[in-house]
Image (spheres, rainbow, N blue to C red):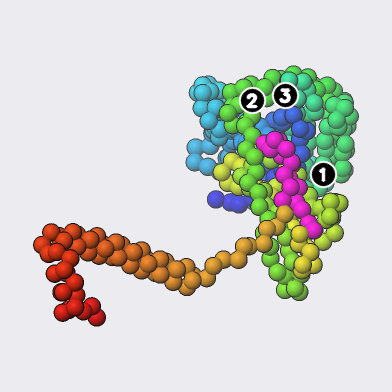
Amino acid sequence: MKTIAPQALLLLLMAKLALTNHLEGSHTMLFFQTLLTWHGFMESQYTYLGYVDDTQFMGYNSRTDKPRMRPHAPWMHQETPEFWEYETQRALNLTKQLTDELKAVLHIYNQSTTGYHTVQMIHGCTALSEGYFRRGYYELNYDARDYIALNEDLNTWTAVGKAAKIIRYQWMMLDFAESLKIFLEDICVQTLQTHLKNGKEILLRTDPPKTHVTHKVRADGTITLRCWALDFYPAEITLTWQRNGHNHTQDMEIMDTRPAGNGTFQKWADVGVTPGEEQSYTCHVQHEGLPEPLTLRWEPPQPSVPTITIVTGLVLGALLIGAVVTFLIWKRKTKGKERAGSELMNPWEYQVQLRVCPAT
């Protein structure tokens, strides 16, 4: 199977940006389309992915066996065969539409159809938890060069590149933005609310982060403190370092939030410190799954008792217990013999025996 060219990865970066920065208390549904062609359009790959927030719920890939739109989330399995047939046919229609648009762009530039070419498209909406529309999205990118996007006012367009500006003019003549506005503010929001209702066990859950701070000595002798946040959902999280109670950004590195592969996310933030000053730094974690923000500090390892000391102590303890038990058994037997002996001899006879057989 052909792999996606580097230009097509731009879609994933745009998706990541959109998915990990939606407003608190809101939810986003986005659809991502990528068309990759090569060998003069004789070969192509088309993918169509649907996401609510950070969770994929359906997807289509033309390069799989028997390409069909398929469910990717538990709640989507309740959809009827007619629904999946409709979505599969729509994906086929969109493949043709994007192919025609790409050919038009290449014609504008008088560019050959040979080589790799891509069209990438994002559309969707963000709504508040109560179901109120917040923002709409409609963006296209041709060969990672020409770019056209619907602005937040849902009336005007931003276009970069000769072909994109020509397409913008055509869309303005067709009042395309007005049609999109109706779809984004109404149908898109209703569909998003349906997904939130049917998939609430997954989409509306909150998994608080598991956090800790690690300590590593660099090659130059300085120290790296790393603040970890693991297994959290949703993806929105804030990690900050403070020094003596004040925000610290110098010599700091923050990893982008990344999927953990199990439906949760992970993130870390590094800070470089001078040896001996580790306790001056604190990591602060904010996430909606936490009842209140966390403050973490690196904890030096506690001195441990050497293993030989532990083993020696155990051996001595066992010997001491054995000696005590042996003494008690001996004492009990001795008392028994004394009681038995007192019944057989009188005190005078006992004293005579002691003189004859003195104790050694």
x and y percentages locating residue 1 in the rendered image: 55, 50
Instruction: Classify mark 1: helix, strand or loop.
Output: strand
In the image, residue 285 lies in the stretch drawn in magenta: yes
Residue at screen point 60% across, 66% down = 303
Quote the CA–CA distance across marks 2 and 3: 9 Å
Q: Quadrant of residue 159?
A: top right
Q: Quadrant of residue 279?
A: bottom right
The segment highlighted magenta reads 280-296
- The kind of residue on which mark 1 rests is Asp
In the image, residue 34 lies in the stretch drawn in magenta: no
- The kind of residue on which mark 3 rests is Ser
x and y percentages locating residue 316 in the rendered image: 40, 70
For this rendering, which residue is in front, 18 or 147?
Answer: 18
Q: Residues within 10 Å of mark 3 (few under 14, many from 20)?
A: few
Q: Quadrant of residue 197?
A: top right
- Residue at mark 3: 129
For this rendering, which residue is in front, 197 or 168?
Answer: 197
